[in-house]
Image (spheres, grey):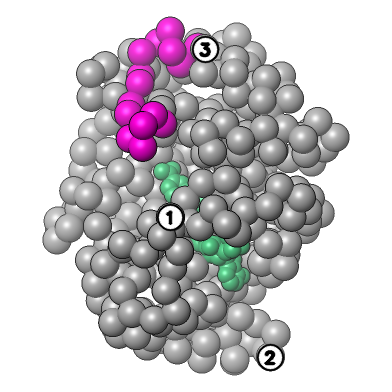
C-alpha cells in the first residue's frame, strides 16, 4: 500500500487506516463480535492498513483491550492512534483535560493496548474548564517520557458549531491549534471528511497542509451511507445513533441517493469489482498527500475492500463528476 507521513516526525503509515470504533462503540451493539473484530484488525494489517484508530472511551475501554490482543503479537506491524480526554458515565460524555488525569489515562491506555509506546496520542476534546495549553503540556511530557511518539487533536466536535459558517465552522479549532503549537508540535488533526461532509476543506485541511500536519479523515464513508449498502427505510436498531439522526431518516436517505448513484457511476468506470465505498475513500485520499482516511469497519471483508481503495486513482473526469453531485439533504447535527 502507498505510504503517507504524519507530522514533522514523518511517521510513515499506510494511506488508508482502520477506524476501530464500530467494533466497540456507536452504531448497533448487536452487531459487535470480538472474534470477528480481531480477524478484521489482522486483515487490515495484512493489507497494509496499519493505522489503527481507537480511543479509551470506545467501549469504554474495550476497544483498546481488543487492540491489545492484536498488538501483543504484531506491534511492529501497527501504528496505533488512541485518544484521551473524554469520559463516559451515566450515558453522558464529559471532558477531562486535567494534567494528572492525562498522565493516568496514558498509563492505562498503554496497559490495555499491551504496548510500551503509543504512536499517536490525541486529545479527544478540549476541556472547557482547563486551558488547552495545560492539557497539551501534559501530553508533551508523555512524549518526553517516551510513552508517546507524537500528538494529535480531534476536531470532530466542530460539527455542532459549523452549520452555515463560511469558514467551515473550524475557526475555534484552528485557534486552539495555534495555541497548542506554541507548546509542542501538532503532528495530526482528526476530523470528519467525506464526500457528503466537506467543511474541513475550507480552512482546517489547508491549515494542516501548510504546516506539515497529517489529517486523519474520520467518518470518510458518511457513517456507511456512501457505501450504498444501507437501505432507505431499512431502519436502525434503537441503540444506533443513526436511528435518531436527521440525515438517516428514510426520507433523507432516499433524497440523498443521487450521491450514491454518482459514486456508483464513477466506480463502474474503474471496473466491475470497484465499489462506491472505494470511490468515496479515493476521493478523500485525493484531497492531499497528508490525508489518511480511517474508515470504520467491523467486518473483515470491508476492511480489505477499503484498504484496496489506496490503489484507486481518480482522474479529472471522476473528480469533476463527484464535485457536481448535489449537496446532501438533511441536517448533519
Ligand atoms: N475523533 C472523533 O471524535 C471521531 C468521531 C467519529 C469517528 N472517529 C473515527 O473515525 C472512524 C471512522 O468513522 P465511522 O466508523 O464512524 O464512520 P465511517 O467510516 O464513515 O463508516 C463506518 C460504517 O461503514 C460501514 N462500512 C465500512 N466499510 C464498508 C464497505 N466497504 N462497504 C459497506 N459498508 C462499509 C461499517 O460497517 P460495519 O461496522 O458493520 O463493518 C460502518 O458501519 C471511526 O472508527 C473512529 O476511529 C473519530
Which image quarter is the C terminus in?
bottom left
Q: Which residue is mark 3?
A: 104
102 vs 292, nearest the viewer? 102
Marker disc for residue 272: 2
Where residue 25 appears, x then y in whole percent? 51, 46
The residue sitting at 72% across, 32% down in the picture is 68
Asked whether mark 2 and ligand 1 are closer than 8 Å, the reply comes as: no
Which span is picked out in magenta? 88-103
Mark yes or no: residue 283 visible: no
Helix, strand or loop status at disc 3: helix
Q: CA distance from mark 3 to mark 1?
A: 30 Å
Question: As drawn, is 241 to the left or to the right of 229?
Answer: left
The residue beneath circle 1 is 239
- On the rendered image, what quadrant is the N terminus found in? bottom right
Mark 1 is surrounded, within 10 Å at the Cα level, by few (under 14), some (14 to 19) or many (20 or more) other residues, namely: few
Residue extending farthest to the right is: 73
Q: Is disc 3 surrounded by few (<14), some (14 to 19) or many (20+) residues within 10 Å?
A: few
Whether disc 1's CB lies below 8 Å from ligand 1 is answered no
Q: Label 1, secondary structure: give it.
A: loop
Q: Disc 3 vs disc 2: Cβ atoms closer than 8 Å?
A: no
Contact check, label 2 and label 1, Cβ < 8 Å: no
Queried whether the magenta region covers residue 99, the answer comes back as yes
Amino acid at each position: 500500500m502507498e505510504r503517507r507521513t504524519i507530522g514533522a516526525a514523518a511517521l510513515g503509515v499506510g494511506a488508508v487506516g482502520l477506524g476501530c470504533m464500530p467494533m466497540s462503540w456507536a452504531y448497533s451493539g448487536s452487531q459487535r463480535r470480538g472474534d470477528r473484530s480481531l480477524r478484521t484488525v489482522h486483515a487490515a494489517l495484512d493489507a497494509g492498513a496499519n493505522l489503527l484508530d481507537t480511543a479509551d472511551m470506545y467501549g469504554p475501554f474495550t476497544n483498546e483491550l481488543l487492540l491489545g490482543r492484536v498488538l501483543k503479537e504484531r506491534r511492529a506491524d501497527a501504528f496505533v492512534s488512541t485518544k484521551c480526554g473524554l469520559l463516559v458515565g451515566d450515558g453522558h460524555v464529559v471532558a477531562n483535560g486535567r494534567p494528572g488525569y492525562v498522565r493516568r489515562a496514558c498509563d492505562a491506555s498503554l496497559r490495555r493496548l499491551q504496548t510500551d509506546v503509543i504512536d499517536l496520542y490525541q486529545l479527544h476534546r478540549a476541556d472547557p474548564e482547563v486551558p488547552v495549553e495545560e492539557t497539551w503540556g501534559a501530553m508533551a511530557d508523555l512524549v518526553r517520557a517516551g510513552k508517546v511518539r507524537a500528538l494529535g487533536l480531534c476536531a470532530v466536535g466542530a460539527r455542532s458549531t459549523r452549520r452555515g459558517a463560511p469558514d467551515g465552522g473550524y475557526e475555534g479549532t484552528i485557534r486552539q491549534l495555534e495555541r497548542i503549537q506554541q507548546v509542542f508540535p501538532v503532528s495530526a488533526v482528526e476530523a470528519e471528511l467525506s464526500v457528503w461532509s466537506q467543511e474541513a476543506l475550507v480552512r482546517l485541511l489547508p491549515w494542516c497542509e501548510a504546516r506539515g500536519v497529517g489529517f486523519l479523515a474520520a467518518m470518510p464513508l458518511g457513517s456507511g451511507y456512501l457505501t450504498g449498502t444501507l437501505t432507505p427505510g431499512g431502519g436502525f436498531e434503537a441503540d444506533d445513533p443513526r436511528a435518531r439522526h436527521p440525515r438517516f431518516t428514510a426520507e433523507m436517505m432516499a433524497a440523498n441517493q443521487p450521491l450514491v448513484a454518482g459514486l456508483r457511476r464513477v466506480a463502474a468506470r474503474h471496473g466491475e469489482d470497484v465499489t462506491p465505498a472505494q470511490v468515496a475513500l479515493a476521493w478523500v485520499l485525493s484531497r492531499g498527500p497528508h490525508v489518511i482516511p480511517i474508515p470504520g469497519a467491523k467486518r473483515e471483508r470491508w476492511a480489505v475492500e477499503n484498504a484496496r481503495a489506496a490503489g484507486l486513482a481518480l482522474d479529472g473526469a471522476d473528480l469533476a463528476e463527484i464535485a457536481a453531485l448535489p449537496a446532501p439533504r438533511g441536517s448533519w447535527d
